[in-house]
Amino acid sequence: AAAGAAPLRIGGAFQSAWEGKDWRKQAVPRSQEEQTDRVLRLIRRCRELGIQAFCAINQLNYASEEYVRDYATTVGREGASGILLADGPSGCGPEVFAFLVRTVKHYAPNCVALVHAHNGFGLAAANSLAGVLAGAEGVEVAVNGYCSATGQADLAHVAVALEALYGIQTGIDLPKLTELARFAEDVVGYHLPANYPLTGREAFNCGGSDTVVQELDVDPLIHWSLEPSVVGNR
């Protein structure tokens, strides 16, 4: 910590809470000014140690445009390398993600913008794509969307959509995605629905509709936008 400044105690409040102690006695920021002061001290310490500092705005649905603008301006000037916009409560739609990514890019032009979307309304992939199309350089995703509650953006959904729909190369080995999804199911023990998009076991099963079955002899892409082999499925 800087000379004369209070020591930085990361996680002290959480540790105290789990131990049944009064966490309110910890040095928890109680105003935007106190939060900003602590963030700036952390960025400076990272710079002293040669570490890139990436900052985050959590609970994005509570953040006003002014807050995001001021935060981006402040941490950008101090030398932060990136700003993550994280919507854990799933309280933002694609338009919000796009708007706030553009806000970050405008007020912190030297920072990369990152997005972290959750799937409470089934919009995690859409929110992630909206962020990328607005200028975000990175997206936090999870294999099979695994996370708390309804999960977050699925790696396969975001990667394949970026490549197949928008022509954005991700560098991800797409044919390995289904194998990875199955491996993750075995490790986690939480299995995907059969009709889960792209990597589900029956994702490419038309269900027996005569029309679609006959179309397969003509061209498999009449009713599908990609062949199963693209993601290693069948």
Image (cartoon, rainbow, N blue to C red):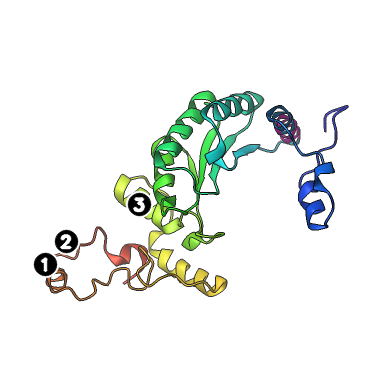
Image quarter hosting the C terminus: bottom left
Q: CA distance from mark 3 to mark 2?
A: 18 Å
In what element is the residue under mark 3? Answer: helix
Q: Are marks 2 and 1 in contact (CB under 8 Å)?
A: yes
In this orientation, does residue 213 appear?
yes
Lateral position of residue 66 relative to residue 202, left or right: right
The one of 65 and 218 positioned closer to us in this rendering:
65
Q: From the image, tell me which residue sits under label 2.
A: 222
Give the quadrant of residue 41: top right
Does 229 appear in magenta? no
Which labelled disc corresponds to residue 218?
1
In what element is the residue under mark 2? Answer: loop
Query: Residue 28, percent across and down?
Result: 77, 39
Q: Are marks 3 and 1 in contact (CB under 8 Å)?
A: no
Q: CA distance from mark 3 to mark 1?
A: 25 Å
Does 44 appear in magenta? yes
At label 2, the amino acid type is Ile
Give the quadrant of residue 148: bottom right
Q: Residues within 10 Å of mark 3 (few under 14, many from 20)?
A: some
Q: From the image, tell me which residue sits under label 3.
A: 161
At label 1, the amino acid type is Val
Residue at figure coordinates x 17%, y 73% from the top left: 209
Which residues make up the magenta segment?
A: 39-48
Q: Residues within 10 Å of mark 1 (few under 14, many from 20)?
A: few
Residue at figure coordinates x 69%, y 29% from the top left: 36
Query: Residue 191, percent across and down?
Result: 47, 72
Above or below, 170 relative to 65: below
At label 3, the amino acid type is Ala
Q: Earlier in the sequence, mark 3 or mark 1?
A: 3
